[in-house]
Image: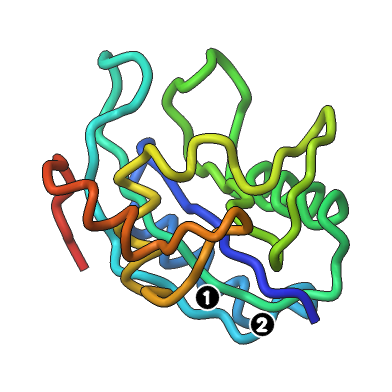
């Protein structure tokens, strides 16, 4: 079993309900097991500001899926939850990003692991540090240090 961390985000419809429904759905799927999720956080959009705030979280799971098969599975889930791919960093019903896959570093045309923006995004680092404070990235950096370096952020914990 591989250990994976996946970022969740949504800002269309009722994002909290969408993420709660997603987690309920994932808990009964054979593709992922041992799911543990962070609190939900509200954040300003990273891209265009003419869209609603996001609700973000990070969840941990174990899987037998290889990285690209997991990416396909996550994109299938996004579609099931009504995601339509439009403008970059635009509004969405659901966004799932594979952050970490074991200690793997992967550069593929469809997938980069660790996720390239992981260390700079407070809406990823804070929830990741909440559920895995002792975790180290494949390059050896502790998540707790990334969290400590983000003394200023605009996240609001909502659950």
Residue 145, percent from left and from top: 32, 59
Find residue 79 and report its horizontal and vertical position in percent: 68, 42
Q: Is residue 155 left or right of residue 21?
A: left
Q: Is residue 104 above or below residue 120?
A: below
**Quarter occupied by residue 53:** top left
Q: Nearer the viewer, residue 30 or 5?
A: 5
2, above or below 8, in the image: below
Q: In this orientation, which residue lies closer to the viewer: 127 or 44?
A: 127
Give the quadrant of the N terminus. Answer: bottom right
| Residue under numbered circle 2 | 28
Which residue appears at 82% of the width and 55% of the height?
Answer: 67
Give the crowd class for mark 2: few <14, some 14-19, many >=20 residues within 10 Å.
Answer: few
In the picture of the structure, the residue carrying the numbered disc 1 is 24
Q: Kindly check if marks 1 and 2 are in contact, taking CB atoms under 8 A apart as contact.
A: yes
Q: Quadrant of residue 35?
A: bottom right
State left or right for residue 115 relative to residue 142.
right
Q: Secondary structure at mark 2?
A: loop
> Is residue 62 shown above or below 86?
below
């Amino acid at each position: 079993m591989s250990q994976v961390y996946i970022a969740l985000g949504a800002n269309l419809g009722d994002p909290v309900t969408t993420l709660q429904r997603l987690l309920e759905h994932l808990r009964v799927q054979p593709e992922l097991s041992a799911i543990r999720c962070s609190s939900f956080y509200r954040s300003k959009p990273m891209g265009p500001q003419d869209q609603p705030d996001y609700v973000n979280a990070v969840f941990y799971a174990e899987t037998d899926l290889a990285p690209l098969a997991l990416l396909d599975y996550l994109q299938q889930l996004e579609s099931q939850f009504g995601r339509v791919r439009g403008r970059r960093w635009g509004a969405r019903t659901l966004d799932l990003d594979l952050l970490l896959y074991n200690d793997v570093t992967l550069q593929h045309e469809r997938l980069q692991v660790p996720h390239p923006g992981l260390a700079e995004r407070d809406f990823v680092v804070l929830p990741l540090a909440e559920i895995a404070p002792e975790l180290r990235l494949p390059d050896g950096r502790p998540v707790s240090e990334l969290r400590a370096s983000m003394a200023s952020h605009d996240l609001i914990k909502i659950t």
